[in-house]
Image (spheres, rainbow, N blue to C red):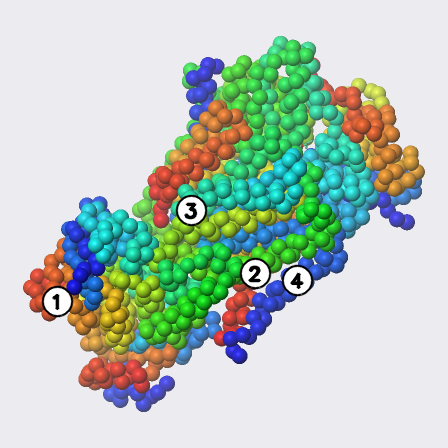
Amino acid sequence: DDVFKVGISAGLTGYAATVDRAWSDGVQTAVDTLNAKGGIMGRKLEVVVEDNRSNPQEAVTVYRKMVSSDEVNLFASGCVSAGNAAAAPMVAKAEIPMILCSILPKDAAWAFTTLPPAGFEIEKRFEYLRDKTDIRKVGVLHDPTPYALLQKDVAQKVAATYGIEVVSVEAYKQDDADLSVQLSKMQAAGAGAVMKIGLGGTTLTAAKNLKQLGSPMLLLTSLEDLAVFKPVAEVLGDKFFFVASPSQVYEVYPDGGLKTAIGEFLEPWRAKFGDRDPNWASRGWDSIMLAAKAIEAGQSFEGSAIRDNLEKITGFQGTTGSYDMSAEKHQGISTNPFVVAQIIEGKVRIAQ
Amino acid sequence: MQTTRLPLATAAVWAVSAAIVGYALIFGGYAATIISFALIYAVFVSGLNVFMGLTAQVSFGQSAFAAIGGYSSAVLTTTYAWPPLAGMSAGLVFSLLAAWAIGFPTLRLKGHYLAMATLAIGLITYEIAVEWESVTQGYLGISGIPPLGIGPFEAVSDRQILVVLSVVVLVIAFAVKRIQHSRLGRSFAAVAGSEEAAATLGINVARTKLVSFLLAAGLASISGSLFVHVVGYVSPEVFGLHMVILAFSMVYIGGLGTVAGPLIGALIVSILPEVFRGMKDSQDLAYGIALILILIYAPKGIAGVAGAFDARRAA
Amino acid sequence: MSAILEVKNATRSFGGLVAVNDVSFSVPSRGVTAVIGPNGAGKTTLFNVIAGTISANGGTILLNGEDVTDFKPEAKAAKGLVRTFQLVKLFQDLTAAENVKVGFHLKTHGGLFAALFQPAWARAAERNSEKTAADLLDLVGLSKVAQTSASILPYGQQRLLEIARALACQPSILLLDEPAAGLNAEESERLARAIRRIAADGTAVLLIEHDMKLVMDIADDVVVLDYGRKIAHGTPDAVRNDPAVLAAYLG
Amino acid sequence: MNPAATSSSLPEVAQPVLDVRSLSASYGHVEALRSVDISVGRGELVAVLGPNGAGKSTLLRAIMGLIPNHGEVLFQGNALTRRKPGAAATKGVVLVPEGRGIFGPMTVLENLELGAYSVGRDKKEVERRLTSVFGLFPRLKERFKQTAGSMSGGEQQMVAVGRAMMADPKVLLLDEPSLGLAPRVTGEILDTLGALSQSGLPVILVEQKAPLALQLACRAYLLSLGRIVATINPREVKSHDELAQYYFA
Amino acid sequence: MDNISLVLQSLISGISIGCVYGLIGIGFCVIYNASGIVNFAQGAFVMIGGMATSVLMTDFQLPYAAAAIGAIIIAGIVGAAVERLVVRPLWNRNVAIFVMILATLAAQIVIERMAYILVGDQPKTLPPVSDLPPMMLGGVAVNIQSLWILASSLIIIAALNVFFKTSRTGKAMRAVSINAEAAVLQGIPVSRMLTLAFVISAMLGAIAGILLTPTQYTAFNVGVPFAISGFIAAIIGGFGRPLGAFIGGIALGVIQSMAILELGAGFKNVAALSLLLLFLFFRPSGLLGSTR
Ligand SMILES: Nc1ncnc2c1ncn2[C@@H]1O[C@H](COP(=O)(O)OP(=O)(O)OP(=O)(O)O)[C@@H](O)[C@H]1O
Ligand SMILES: Nc1ncnc2c1ncn2[C@@H]1O[C@H](COP(=O)(O)OP(=O)(O)OP(=O)(O)O)[C@@H](O)[C@H]1O
Ligand SMILES: CC(C)C[C@H](N)C(=O)O
Ligand SMILES: [Mg+2]
Ligand SMILES: [Mg+2]
């Protein structure tokens, strides 16, 4: 009879576009898969997606629309931290749980996130540098978005434990046309590698700039769509490394529960989207699977019941890791699933 | 009596606006959100209209004052627990001071140079909002801002907010109407017509422009404060270039230099995207095309066309 | 009769061209003084210097004995010196009546407060402006177009409107740059009458004009410029028969 | 129209070069021109007179296609496409507009060269015309490098008239060319116009200085409130008063 | 790298990116000189240049040069379309200058969205014109692509100068921008001039896009930031002056890179814009003075 409505406020345009489109396609894939099996507890699901242009004001508008016009039962919203934060109080008031891929809003009573802690991406890169290279000085290049700032802070804090020194921290903006000065500064400070934190075409710009400067520094970037990385690899070759989530290196990832979980997602995903990057989409998938689990656990579609049961989820195997939630912890992933990867001759592989 | 004939078309513009707001009042919910934003924009655009419409100057940087107002409200009410009205007033004072300091050198510029200088001011303010993290919390923004209210009375429901905003917009429209037909308004019009001629009639051109700029900045500041209290949240993107472009569309589509223009312009430009929302990826495309068509077919704006129609009827 | 305006050794050049070259004369506080001379003689430049629209390179301008050389136009207007332009500069979007009302700026006061709250005195001032504006429009024969937007008035009427607007300032000296240009014989006749009335009411008038009939009819004094220099100064009759003037201008 | 006001003994119009038939134009709902007929032939200079706001400028602008209009404008027997501004100009009908319309930021020389735009790339021809314009206005030759907008009022008028001469017009329309010119220069310009029309060029002259215009004109149209109220033969106008009579007829 | 070479290196970087801004600013000048319009869709032409070249190379397997020429032609066609469909109707209605600016902004949105629908949102890039390692002068790297940009800009500036100052069409275009009605009266085909102006400046924008994309990336949405930088460059130079725009672009680039060097990247735009403001206060009509 009645469908269970999942609302997505996503930055289908604007700076988060790549990420949020993938996220929302992932959510849709999960919903289709569940519906094919008859839905959750016999109730079908339906997705409502609204574009928030990666802008918090729009985000508020579309959240409002989905709350009052579409009467959604659950939000599986995208990765724009600011927009999610802006809408969080209003969503909480409407008693609708939200599962996100951004950092958690200040008042997170109703919000859960599929995003691993900011440190994970940093630690993997430090590990790699420590174990596989003799580079001990790095520069950190980051954009001013909240998630990037968090990572930057972690990098500065934990570097020493890896025997690494952060010799230079430089910012950039998403629409910068040139990063050479920042890179030159890092090089002048003695950095042997650049840790870039942030999304979008600027990774390509950084790579071009490194080449134009004739710089020997390695480039290690944070998670991003593989489609962006391919041209970067063409420019920098084996000087280019990136943090990859397990789904991005599925073929070469060691067998186990995680690989199985990813496989379940990849099957319908690839059927529909071919070799499009699965990373952010797999989080979207996770969000729905988490919700399904919580609903089934509580045998209730009630917002507050879903919320309470989400808090009780432990050991849930998702596509990016295993989720352990609690009343205090709405960020469920607690073991680092990432690897450092490279693209060599057009093929993604785990860096050696 | 010949002279007091009802300006029919202009009245119609007001009636349509009232109907739209009334609809939102009755049905509440999502419509109320959109119309609330539209009314807040109407306040902002009214200021722009004073500066651009009545005084024929141009500013691409009014978002700066909205940001000052908005952030003052946000920071003072959250970090320092001031009441909303006090935060708003402080924001107004800061905005006026900033506008005064900036206005002196800037308003000597003309045309594209004035456009550029004001654009620069808007962009600089935006950058400061992003970079001054210790106060503004950067892109993450400030949440938990209390709703509008005086003492124990708070406008929290959609309808209460709509009523408050409608009253604000009406008061401002009435004020603009009075200014337009006053000595001050005529000196604005004189500066708009010919600065050289205005000066020879004893009008202090620099001061007149500054007054107009301050009015615009004040209204921008108020709109910024209203926004953060209504939404409960603020971040730099609210006051980005996007805001300027939107406000420009509103002021021209509504009708530059008219009293009803800012309101009807804000309503139309806010509703337009909703009309195209179902078009998904083509939404912006449709919006852009609609904007171009409106500009071509109503270059004087809705209220401008109505005014011309009335003038014709009266003649 | 005392001089209201004294121009002493006024000089202004553009690059190598000396447009106004060491010109001195004074304008009595009553009556009409005309400035004539060939095209490019420096008449408009002289006006611009006097009114403060452009700065002088040298010389002094005394208004009622006060040195106002470096005053801005609005400051000079406040001292009673008001001008019109060779190419009319009206406030195009305002009606004729509103244009004149702007002219009352110096004679009225009130800013934002008066605009918003419209206290009794402000309303009274407004009514007064309304009435005086109507009188002034009547003086120049524009009553019929009082409510017409300035931009659509034919050229000749625009010139008259500009004069009415200047008069609204109740200037003690009025500078008119070619007021009769574009008027036909009838209309310049009406203009001449208006100027004579203005002068009779106690406003000194300084005017530039190429219409010799008008100049000879109404000027009490004529200053003749040629190549930036003053070549003659005297009564219309004296000037008319001055050989230098004949050679340079009248031909 | 009041046919009674028309002089009886007008000379025959010799094959009109420009023939305007029931031309009307309005600004919004203001009818500024109501069914006006005028024509000018080879060797003729016709004057258009009338009080301020009569529609003189409107008439010339309508002929040039600058404003929407109804009626017919025949040039050498062919209708000018009236909806396309510039159609008249490219055929050699040239207007010196009210308010001069010079290109202020450009130099005097550039202004003049643009007058000869339709000559194309024939440098020699442009030179030849420049020489003749400079002959007429020596001041322009002295100041050919000055930006036109910084010239004095009268000098700008010279630029405007000079620019029109550069086009080597087939029909010349002038809207108050004497505006702002010193009496002597006015005389010179009007003499030149007389000479040009004698040598065959059809000229329509809108002029406030009616006596001067009537000295040259072979025919004068009197315009009032957008209508031709009289067509007169200047030789028959004996005094200024008589003219005034027409004005207020 | 020692301190002096870091400063020099940053200076070189600033000049390189500045050349890009300048090249974009030149496009603004052409339309302005020919019509008095400030065309904010200029950034879209820059985007089309890089984007179309990339698509023609990868999806249609065209050689670099052919793809580039194809992209320039496409941009020219889009420029003509913008003029015909957006600018002309407004021009004929004699709208206020800022209505026109707003309309070109709307055109920018439309082009951007069409590009998005046609080619998606993934960033793309182009190989450098000549794939050589940077030239090393002491410890300072000068990249070859920037030399290409510099040389092309200078050639374009010289060509435009000759065009506007001496050619009949160029002068006619300036006349149109100053007083369109008077231009009509001289028999100048105003509408053809307008179209031509948009085609030329669209092509210049495309050339800028083709030259700059190898140094970074292009995507459907790079237009607006580029347009703003180009506009600033044009203003610094004195609006309407190609050489001024170019110098202005370099000034902007250098200021930005020095700001990043000394103050940190967060303040790069604040510094550049503040300097722009100061500059406007002291030289309100730009380095070389406006053309009008
Ligand atoms: N800004 C300027 N730059 C260069 N020359 C100028 C400038 N302004 C005026 N001139 C020149 O100075 C001279 C005097 O100009 P002015 O306008 O004062 O003449 P005028 O006597 O008013 O002439 P007219 O009767 O034609 O109006 C003219 O030759 C003019 O070209
Ligand atoms: N742009 C316009 N909009 C509306 N009405 C106009 C416009 N221009 C002129 N008019 C009106 O058209 C009528 C004719 O004006 P026009 O300028 O043709 O007169 P004119 O005979 O040239 O007068 P003048 O001798 O003063 O130049 C006038 O009543 C005028 O008010
Ligand atoms: C995961 C990322 C899309 C998060 C983004 N940088 C933000 O904080 O808004
Ligand atoms: Mg003069
Ligand atoms: Mg006229």
What residue would you read off at disc 2?
Answer: B174
Q: Are marks 1 and 4 in contact (CB under 8 Å)?
A: no
Instruction: Give the residue at the far left of this rendering.
Output: C243
Per the model, the C-alpha gap separating discs 1 and 2 is 57 Å
What residue would you read off at disc 4?
Answer: B18
Which marked residue is nearer to the observer: mark 1 or mark 3?
1
**Vertically, is D241 above or below B312?**
below
What residue would you read off at disc 1?
Answer: C235
Amino acid of disc 3 = Leu
Please tell me if label 1 and label 4 are on a single chain.
Answer: no
Crowdedness of circle 3 by 10 Å Cα count: few (<14), some, many (20+)?
A: many
Amino acid of disc 1 = Thr
Chain under numbered label 1: C
Q: Are marks 2 and 3 in contact (CB under 8 Å)?
A: no
Per the model, the C-alpha gap separating discs 1 and 3 is 47 Å
Q: Secondary structure at mark 4?
A: helix
Observer-nearest residue: C34 or C186? C34
* Pointer 4 or 2: first along the chain: 4
A179 relative position to E177: left or right: right
Q: Are marks 1 and 2 in contact (CB under 8 Å)?
A: no
C148 relative position to D233: left or right: right
Which quadrant of the figure has residue A269? Answer: top right
